[in-house]
Image (cartoon, rainbow, N blue to C red):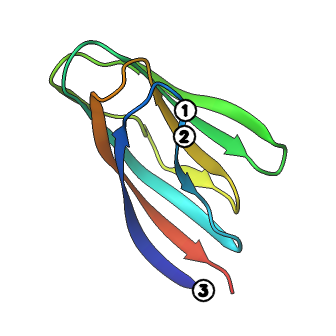
Amino acid sequence: MANTYKSYFVDLTTTDKTTIYTVPANTTSLVKTIQLSNDTGNPNITVHVTDSSSSTEYEIAHITMSSKSTNNFAFGTIVLEANDILKIQSSDANTITGIVSLLEISFK
C-alpha cells in the first residue's frame, strides 16, 4: 500500500464542467482542499463528483464567489473511490484558478 500526496492545478477556461481528477484503479483518494480564487465578477461555482459505482453525478458544493476572493470548497475530507471523477464548473470563463490537494492510497 502506497500513500502519495498530490496537487492538481485548476484553470477554468470554459463554462462547461471541467474534469479535474479521476481516481486511478486500485486507489482511494482523500481530497483535503479544493481552493479556488476568483479574479473578477461574481461567478457561480459548482463542484461535482461522479460515483463510478453507480454512474451518478452529485453536486457537492455551490458558492457564488465575490470578485478578488478565495474559497475552499471542501468543508471536510472528501473520500473518492477508484474511477470516481471530480469536476468543477464556473458560470464565467477565464476567471477561476486554484488547486486541489489530495492523498492517494494505492492498493497493489
Residue 36 visible to the viewer: no
Q: Earlier in the sequence, mark 2 or mark 3?
A: 3
Residue drawn where x is 19% and y is 19% of the image:
40
Q: Is residue 4 above or below residue 47?
A: below
Pick the front one: 102 or 16: 16
Q: Name the residue under label 1.
A: 17
Residue 2 position, x and y percent, is: 54, 84
Residue 46 position, x and y percent, is: 49, 26
In the picture, the disc for residue 1 is 3
What whole-number distance in Å separates the C-alpha atoms at marks 1 and 3? Answer: 32 Å
**Helix, strand or loop for disc 3:** loop
Q: Do the residues labelled 1 and 2 touch (CB within 8 Å)?
A: yes
Neighbour class for label 1 at 10 Å: few (<14), some, many (≥20)? some
Q: What residue type is labelled 1?
A: Lys
Q: Mark 2 points at which residue?
A: 87
Residue drawn where x is 15% and y is 24% of the image:
68
Q: In this view, does 56 lie to the left or right of 32?
A: right
**Helix, strand or loop for disc 2:** strand
Q: Which amino acid does label 3 sit on?
A: Met
From the viewer's perspective, is the residue at label 1 or at label 3 nearer?
1
The quarter of the image holding the C terminus is: bottom right
